[in-house]
Image (spheres, rainbow, N blue to C red):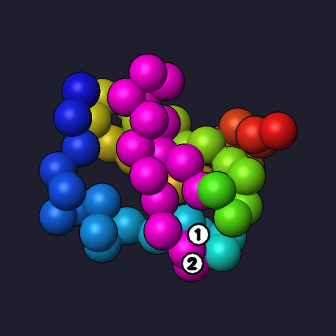
Amino acid sequence: MIIDPKMLNILVCPKTRGPLTFDSKTNELISKKAKLAYPIKDGIPILLIDRARKLE
């Protein structure tokens, strides 16, 4: 799956309001500042902090 660059420019991390990057290997949006990975299900980003995976 590929994320539209226009959409990626609009979306921000709900915790930090910082930018997100797309990880095509895991199909997640990554917030480096918050160290969280938000899943994408059926093409829809799930930008809920409690559903994000913590990164190390």
Q: Rate crowding at label 1 as few (under 14), some (14 to 19) or many (20 or more) other CA atoms within 10 Å.
A: few
Q: In screen coordinates, is 6 left or right of 38?
A: left
Rendered image: mark on residue 14: 1
Q: In screen coordinates, is 37 left or right of 19?
A: right
x and y percentages locating residue 36 in the rendered image: 68, 49
Residue 13 occupies which quadrant of the picture?
bottom right
- Asked if 52 appears above or below 49 in the picture, the reply is above
Residue 3 occupies which quadrant of the picture?
top left
x and y percentages locating residue 31 in the rendered image: 59, 56
Could one spot residue 19 in this view of the protein? yes
Rendered image: mark on residue 17: 2
Secondary element type, mark 1:
loop
Q: In screen coordinates, is 6 left or right of 36?
A: left
The magenta stretch spans which residues? Answer: 17-31
Q: Is residue 24 magenta?
A: yes
Name the quadrant of the N terminus.
top left
Rendered image: mark on residue 53: none
x and y percentages locating residue 44 in the rendered image: 32, 42
